[in-house]
Amino acid sequence: MSAPGAARAPEPTPPAPVLEVERLRVTFPVRRGVLGRRVGTLVAVDDVSFALRPGRTLGLVGESGCGKSTLGRAILRLCEAESGRVAVDGVDVRALTGERLRRARRKMQMIFQDPYASLDPRRTVLDCVAEPLTVHGLAPSRRAALPAVTRLLERVGLEASHLGRYPHELSGGQRQRVGIARALALEPLLIVADEPVSALDMSIRAQIVNLLVELQRELGLAYLFIAHDLALVRYVSHEVAVMYLGRVVEHAPVRALFARPFHPYTHALLASAPVPDPDAERGRRRLVLAGEPPSPLEPPTGCAFHPRCPHAEARCAEERPELRTVGDGHRAACHLEAPRAWPASAEGA
Ligand code: SF4
């Protein structure tokens, strides 16, 4: 212990964020009729901001259709945002075009949910993993890429004997390993993993998740990990953002979010997730979240969660709550002064 008054060693400066997202908004036109007349606008992602540092994982959770996959795709410029800023390694990628955008894409890669759909069935493993290297000029030919591809396969737990196989000759887990090798080929800083194990058998999921965790430790990768399996998100993430109808309603370090959720929607998500222990599951009161999520075409006024929230007050239907600090590194968008338990009447058996 240092003596009172002794000079303290300065705190190490945290590394600069790999990814900075500021007030991102993604909309899609809604068209009807044979002429495709525009009849409205769907707001898929609204006013989302966060930063992600190297070696960290941000888990992104929420019901289907809440905008989490669209957010991941907009960050990678697989769909265009309407407004906001996305900086990868300090470079505003929304401002880039042509060759500069292509170069920036090397730093950010995606791992898809369905490895079978993301691999070309007519191309061998060597072709699939060599392609990014040849396209980005890191290898002049497929043959020249062979040593690098072999190393990548070894790194993801495959062997040189897999090089000549086609996707249909591989198991689901092996196909996802090929997808990961392909994502790693360009030595990215950021990986967006969109439900990367939900299409796999339960027995394979843990292997792929552990592989991703190991690769992060070795390579210092930053992950945006999109998933609906809360136990999985809890295992892989350093922090978690909860999305509801296109907006982040809670963002916290993983322990704080699971131990002390603030937003009533986060309470509902956590309380509705199954527990793997059958005894614990039997003795638990499950929370049933009433009603379907509202349509993003006609979002509710004020707090979008108010039609389903047991704590809603008059103010909630009129005033949209902004994200505010409710704890150390913990932010929530709710008018409540403190988190409240859901009333027993809202809980199932
Ligand atoms: Fe519920 Fe109101 Fe908080 Fe929205 S702002 S989550 S309606 S208490």
Image (cartoon, rainbow, N blue to C red):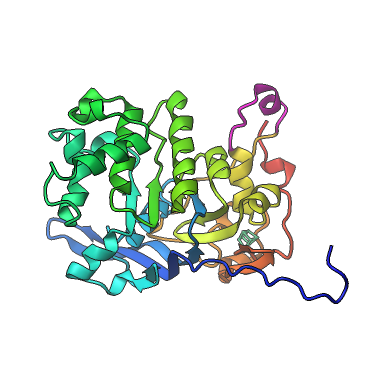
Who's the residue at 52% across and 45% down the image? Answer: 291
Q: Which percent across, then down, holds residue 36?
A: 16, 60
Determine the quadrant in which ligand 1 lies. Answer: bottom right
**Residue placed most toward the observer, 81 or 53:** 53
**Residue placed most toward the observer, 215 or 316:** 215
Q: Which residues are magenta?
A: 273-284
Q: Any magenta on residue 78?
A: no
Q: Which percent across, then down, holds residue 188?
A: 35, 55
**Residue placed most toward the observer, 221 or 86:** 221
Q: Which percent across, then down, holds residue 342?
A: 70, 48
Q: Quadrant of residue 283?
A: top right
Instruction: Say which quadrant the N terminus sits in.
Output: bottom right
Q: Is residue 345 above or below residue 32?
A: above
Q: Is residue 343 above or below residue 80?
A: above
Q: Is residue 192 above or below residue 303?
A: above
Q: Quadrant of residue 24?
A: bottom left
Tell me if residue 309 can be seen: no
Who's the residue at 71% across and 71% down the image? Answer: 9
Tell me if residue 89 can be seen: yes
**Residue placed most toward the observer, 81 or 343:** 81
